Image (cartoon, coloured by chain):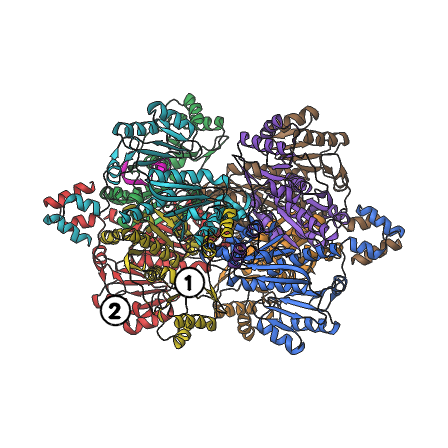
Chain colours: A brown, B orange, C blue, D purple, E green, F red, G yellow, H cyan
Amino acid sequence: MELKELLSRVRSGELAVEEAEIMLGGQEYEDIGCAKIDFHRSARRGFGEVIFCQGKKTEHLVHIYETFRDRGVNVMGTRATPEQFEAVKRAVPQAVYDEVSRVLKYEPAPVEKKGLVAVCTGGTADIPVAEEAAQTAEFHGSQVLRVFDVGVAGIHRLFSRIEDIRKANCIVAVAGMEGALGGVITGLVDKPVIAVPTSIGYGASFQGVAPLLSMLNSCAEGMAVVNIDNGFGAGYMGAQINRLILAGNE
Amino acid sequence: MELKELLSRVRSGELAVEEAEIMLGGQEYEDIGCAKIDFHRSARRGFGEVIFCQGKKTEHLVHIYETFRDRGVNVMGTRATPEQFEAVKRAVPQAVYDEVSRVLKYEPAPVEKKGLVAVCTGGTADIPVAEEAAQTAEFHGSQVLRVFDVGVAGIHRLFSRIEDIRKANCIVAVAGMEGALGGVITGLVDKPVIAVPTSIGYGASFQGVAPLLSMLNSCAEGMAVVNIDNGFGAGYMGAQINRLILAGNE
Amino acid sequence: MELKELLSRVRSGELAVEEAEIMLGGQEYEDIGCAKIDFHRSARRGFGEVIFCQGKKTEHLVHIYETFRDRGVNVMGTRATPEQFEAVKRAVPQAVYDEVSRVLKYEPAPVEKKGLVAVCTGGTADIPVAEEAAQTAEFHGSQVLRVFDVGVAGIHRLFSRIEDIRKANCIVAVAGMEGALGGVITGLVDKPVIAVPTSIGYGASFQGVAPLLSMLNSCAEGMAVVNIDNGFGAGYMGAQINRLILAGNE
Amino acid sequence: MELKELLSRVRSGELAVEEAEIMLGGQEYEDIGCAKIDFHRSARRGFGEVIFCQGKKTEHLVHIYETFRDRGVNVMGTRATPEQFEAVKRAVPQAVYDEVSRVLKYEPAPVEKKGLVAVCTGGTADIPVAEEAAQTAEFHGSQVLRVFDVGVAGIHRLFSRIEDIRKANCIVAVAGMEGALGGVITGLVDKPVIAVPTSIGYGASFQGVAPLLSMLNSCAEGMAVVNIDNGFGAGYMGAQINRLILAGNE
Amino acid sequence: MELKELLSRVRSGELAVEEAEIMLGGQEYEDIGCAKIDFHRSARRGFGEVIFCQGKKTEHLVHIYETFRDRGVNVMGTRATPEQFEAVKRAVPQAVYDEVSRVLKYEPAPVEKKGLVAVCTGGTADIPVAEEAAQTAEFHGSQVLRVFDVGVAGIHRLFSRIEDIRKANCIVAVAGMEGALGGVITGLVDKPVIAVPTSIGYGASFQGVAPLLSMLNSCAEGMAVVNIDNGFGAGYMGAQINRLILAGNE
Amino acid sequence: MELKELLSRVRSGELAVEEAEIMLGGQEYEDIGCAKIDFHRSARRGFGEVIFCQGKKTEHLVHIYETFRDRGVNVMGTRATPEQFEAVKRAVPQAVYDEVSRVLKYEPAPVEKKGLVAVCTGGTADIPVAEEAAQTAEFHGSQVLRVFDVGVAGIHRLFSRIEDIRKANCIVAVAGMEGALGGVITGLVDKPVIAVPTSIGYGASFQGVAPLLSMLNSCAEGMAVVNIDNGFGAGYMGAQINRLILAGNE
Amino acid sequence: MELKELLSRVRSGELAVEEAEIMLGGQEYEDIGCAKIDFHRSARRGFGEVIFCQGKKTEHLVHIYETFRDRGVNVMGTRATPEQFEAVKRAVPQAVYDEVSRVLKYEPAPVEKKGLVAVCTGGTADIPVAEEAAQTAEFHGSQVLRVFDVGVAGIHRLFSRIEDIRKANCIVAVAGMEGALGGVITGLVDKPVIAVPTSIGYGASFQGVAPLLSMLNSCAEGMAVVNIDNGFGAGYMGAQINRLILAGNE
Amino acid sequence: MELKELLSRVRSGELAVEEAEIMLGGQEYEDIGCAKIDFHRSARRGFGEVIFCQGKKTEHLVHIYETFRDRGVNVMGTRATPEQFEAVKRAVPQAVYDEVSRVLKYEPAPVEKKGLVAVCTGGTADIPVAEEAAQTAEFHGSQVLRVFDVGVAGIHRLFSRIEDIRKANCIVAVAGMEGALGGVITGLVDKPVIAVPTSIGYGASFQGVAPLLSMLNSCAEGMAVVNIDNGFGAGYMGAQINRLILAGNE
């Protein structure tokens, strides 16, 4: 529908203002002073909201969590520091923190976890990014299979787990250094793979450029890549695909 | 299942050799001299095979298409030159060629096209890459909605089409230069977006590096990126996701 | 005005559909088959349209020029080849081509040229890009002062012309290799400077990266930069600023 | 006028020494020991001077502010640390400091703010750079409209404000990560846009390279780019253009 | 042997499960909670294991060393901090630490050192990386000749030692800055050279990119390169080649 | 031995001039006008010489081959064009050319091929580089096992051949795009691996940078890397290691 | 002398207009239509002028050479094509062309060649750049010692010539690939070395970036670097230093 | 003289061992435990030695200075920390330290300063690098003219000093950010210019890459470049050229 037509229909009453607003991308967010939060989206989608904690002032973060607490809406913070957690916990004692992934969750109304997303890593050093992906997928309603430390320098470890990985609806492959994990899994499993390069490594890894390029250049069919260390982005997209497949199943 | 256990089960007869082979990633391919082709996979999945034509010798390519013709299996070549097409056509007259996408198809047993993948471009110069994505998705059983020339410098053109794009199960966003299209669509539609940077542009585009970085850095939730100009990869993954969602629906 | 409010006013009739459309970025373009052209914008702004000819099929380009000819609207093509010009000329004999800048103009209703934009180059090799800028500025209603070959390795040549440059409302500084021209002029003249790095040079020029970085790092106050070789972009912005200043004057 | 002619006129008395000096870029600055300050320029232009505080020794900075205080001339420091502010404040109690933008102002003779420059950001993390731009524009006599957190991943937020942005004479668009804000605004508003990439982000943002390239490659007409995080440069140029337009109006 | 054939032989009893497992890359590792360690490999090869200490939690590292102590197996940690050493030493008093190379060894059953690997450096600043290489080679059963500070800016120092270097079975050449050492040695000695670029240097060294590129581009015959600062990798490969040559000799 | 001591021994007659010369890297080469060739080295080592044909004038190349023909010494040219071959063939009819690897050999006294070097590729497009490596190894006295098209996107194909690869004394792993082959093989085989990145690929492969970085960052033990497309360098080093191991065996 | 003082002295007659002009960088050039040539500088310095031929239109180049011919002034063109030479030769038969360096000279009044500049190369492929340097130095009055093909992979060849190189007043070191030649020579000779990286090489040479970085990072004392392939710049500076030393000697 | 001939002459007694050693680059250095110092070179050249202090252990540095003190030989340390100075001062009270350049000198036998080297900077932030250059030149016997803060954004300040700069035998031009100073000076003065890019700046300066590229690409004749921030290298080469010119004069 052309913009003009849309507006004409609003004018004539054929189209409700609210519907037109959504067609134009409008979303209602609430301004709580230090942040604009879209509680309606949470309600509509059935999940909570996600807050990028890095660089946020502690008092602002506490205020955000208090608002969620007051409304009983789930919230998940990424890249939270232990200090941020301590402050949030004082205000919202039910908040829980995972040191490895630096995820800070408050889930008064946990969503049911369904379907399956597999989260794999090349090494143990990639686990923090993988955990961010896994917790993000869980927060958005997916069950998660964790398969860590199955990098290609010891490919038999991957083989031992490949049967399980094949059961997932979507796979998140997290790897630093040479970053070959994504391509190898994609070659073995006919499911969409979201690859996450990590900044683990040194020298010619260039803070994750090496695995990023490696993943982009894989000739395996069915893999796409997110930003270096972006466990959240991969976990979100994994859960989104899983959810769409499940929705199809229902 | 550990490797040792798998082998023990094969030994004891609990597990058939063929099943074990598939668990270990084994796929039967046929060596036709100049190429190894996995006709069994085509049979199993119901689609044909894809051939990367660039750099292939014409006589080899003709031989490949003849083999597919003889078996009545679908085949789609990417990055084929008009010269390659002419030679293939002499041997396989039903082969069809699309100049824009450089796709060279032979489809004796066309697959049914179901579900929907939307393929969008920022400009008209991105169309060749987008067409490769679109034809790949169609070849793998998806219907495709083409929404071209809706780049962010004239954002209203995107708005006119956003309603239709929202109906797709997966979106392929193709853009060169600033590459902002993917992030904008992802912000407007709650479906997985596969972004394809193109090498269109000049100067500081650096043959697609600018849109690649732009897409990797988008903070929109639900987008992943494939290699520069990799329309095939995006189209394949789009169709794969679409198919999985439909399979859920059946 | 919030989106909701805008739509509510359309609904109530307070706001006309057309006005709302413009507020939302809507522009009427006409689809002439191979291109979408915004003749209304031309009418509204008083200038013609600009076509990026590079990579366009000759038959499409000819059709575009014919459409402009039929409506008597000005059109300027950038990066046109001599072959494209020959074809266009056969259909639109009044079209004129400048070999240096590769600009292909058809101006049935030339605009009055007012105010002044200065276009300067470091060397003679930068002239093609500078001419594109100059002709773009002229096409959009500016007078242009050309000051070529005044690079900093022979700074006295710039000094001889600085008095004239100071009379312009905006300066376009085009330079390759070390790219110092922009910063030097900005230090001497209190007018906005649009710097254009060019891909002229060899070795560590890296096709224009050296002057691009040089220009971005200048500590002179009042300079901004466009893409490598983007004479059009600089000329457009120069004319835009010139026009706004003149509009103020009227 | 050629250099020789200029000198000949000086010789013959046709041209005053002072005029010739200005033609040759001569400006009188005063050496206050640790810095050379052009108080005459301040007087001539009606604004104060700007000091880049980063890396300056505290005692030198204090001395500079004392000199301005003694002469009653406005001064604005950029990238000042809280420690520098504390020291300056002890000597010049009227100095004010903005923690967000790190701007340290002393304005005994505030200039009148006229016209309008809009300063927009993609996210909240871009605000420090945007504030530097905004305060710079205000210091140089512009009114400033701040429109923060309107990035393209939630494009409707930009739409709600676009009407206001269109009223400005010049727009400063500040964005990190994918950096698409500049191009989108430029496509919506027919005023010059100065784009500022920021180093906000992680991974493939490469400290601002991603938005820098994105902005340089935008095909929107009427945008130019300054260095990563260079809020000052954009604010200065925005105010300069605003001032020239107003001057035209007077 | 094709995968199918291998499995068929397992099925028929022609091939033992254990043999098949090794053919497929299977290795038995032991999961000690915080790490998976392949004690069998150590037994099989006669060397201990190597642990990358950087980033490992101290308690985990202590547990790993305790496990090795309990089994009497050699272990060598790379990139260990003095703090990690202190903690390990409390649990395993026989552990020894080398401050320069940051290697943390526990060798209850030292291997015999045979053959010769030469480890050379361009400057004194390259010694930490070189020592890591030297100690790695020793840990894996090689004698090591250390030839430090023989960079090409004072080529006569290299000449004084070239006779000795020629006696080694393999040479590790460690150099930062211009990185020319590898090529010069390779030109003088007909033995395989493993070159290690180091991140020593400043400015256009780009943390080791300059010597990395220099080494990759050498036209000397018989040199290959490992990652920047990867002393371990070069030492391992040097010892591996040395061992294979000695095995030939036995 | 210090330089001074060496010279003193020459002075006193303890050390022959010829021995001292060799100690100082001196090699006798012969100047045949357009090239300096070290026939003595060929005699001493038992292999012929290698000529880099790219960019050489045809008449010079013909003269070089004639000189080798006249002396009956083996010579192998790399990167020869078909045109160069035609010209050489007219003068030296026994010269043979391999189109794939562009190697141009004249071997009047073929060396015995002993031991084994395995040359593996990820894809079929890597074969030209692999063949250069293989022929170089053969020219220098190694038997070669070719294992092509066993890239990690179809890892089972590698598994089918891994038993054979393990028999080689040294492995050359050639791969473009993601470049993971080297690391996977190194993890499966305890022999030195020389990895060769190729410029095969497109987009973010950056002419071989992606596989180069991938290979440098592999955490598999026992791999080093040569320049992009440097099949010759890898083949030479493979043969050198193979020869040293065999020499040990004799 | 401050600018104001200078102008005051011109005013008072203390300083001649011509002298003041030179102090301000003024040079008289002549505009011959397609170029501005500084014949006075040639006269003053005793050398001819240098023309960068690349990209110049043939008719313009011919006109330039005719002008020099008419005045009897020496001229040297760099990067001239054989076609340009043919055209120039028809007009100026005494013009001579060197195919290797692409230098096109017309020297009616050859300057005396004095002192000594050594020009060395790493390989034979670097000779074109080295010849440009050598001919430039000769054109500007230096004798030149050519020492080609003495790269560090066969360091003894450099040793054979080092005695001669030491006699030069300045050394130009030209090298591609690893680029180590400059540092090695600088370590052996206590004279200023101008290093020229060349774009010779492939793969990770990145068109000369590898030798450029290598040369910039050398820790040898007394070397500086010019642009990739800039034989002219190095030859000019070598001759300039040689001339200044000779002038001291006279 | 060929290597063979040299050795033959040594053998026959025609050439002394010591002379031959020097011809082969031999220099006598003394190993004082933590460093190898060439006291003979100091004696021969008449200057002291230079020590790169960065990263050196304090006890080693103190020992080095004590050795120089005991022998009464001049020594200059670069990049020394205040802590290193404090420690050295306790052992060698006459040592002096300059905080700006971080140079730590002990000069028991100061050399006479002759001739002139000019050291110029673009801004005040470049002064530390410039001072390192200046003090290095003085240490090696040159008088130094310091001309700081004459960058091209205020070109008239450079003009005021150009007359003085022209008197130097060699010019060191130090600049960060856009790095245009070197090219402008080279265009104004016919003396060799050594340009030093500095890492001063932010954003797209990329720690000195911007001025490095700018300087390498200057088309001014008579300039060469050293590594980013390498004040020592430029000062050494400046003094070397100055000394050679003076030697000519004597």
Q: Does the magenta stretch include residue E115?
A: yes
Quadrant of the frame with the N terminus of chain H: bottom left
Using a 10 Å C-alpha cutoff, classify the residue at mark 1 as few (fewer than 14 neighbours), some (14 to 19) or many (20 or more): some
* Residue E1 visible in rendering: no
In depth, the one of B53 and E32 nearer the eye is: B53
Q: In this view, does H166 lie to the left or right of C144?
A: left
Q: The residue under label 1 is which amino acid type?
A: His
Cα separation, mark 1 vs mark 2, equals 55 Å
Q: Mark 1 points at which residue?
A: G40
Q: The residue under label 2 is which amino acid type?
A: Glu
Q: In which quarter of the image is residue H136?
A: top left
Q: In which quarter of the image is residue E51?
A: top left
How many numbered badges does the structure rendering display?
Answer: 2
Using a 10 Å C-alpha cutoff, classify the residue at mark 2 as few (fewer than 14 neighbours), some (14 to 19) or many (20 or more): some
Q: Is residue A122 above or below residue F38?
A: above
**Circle 1 or circle 2, nearest the eye:** 1
Q: Is residue F5 left or right of residue C38?
A: left
Residue found 86% across the figure and 48% down from its top:
C8
In depth, the one of A78 and H7 nearer the eye is: H7
Which region shows up in magenta? Answer: E112-130
Q: Position of residue F246 (x, y in %)?
A: 27, 49
Instruction: For mark 1, give the secondary structure.
Output: helix
Q: Chain ID for label 2?
A: F
Q: Name the residue under label 2.
A: F66
Q: Is residue D4 above or below residue D167?
A: below
* Residue B83 visible in rendering: yes
Q: Position of residue B75 (x, y in %)?
A: 58, 64
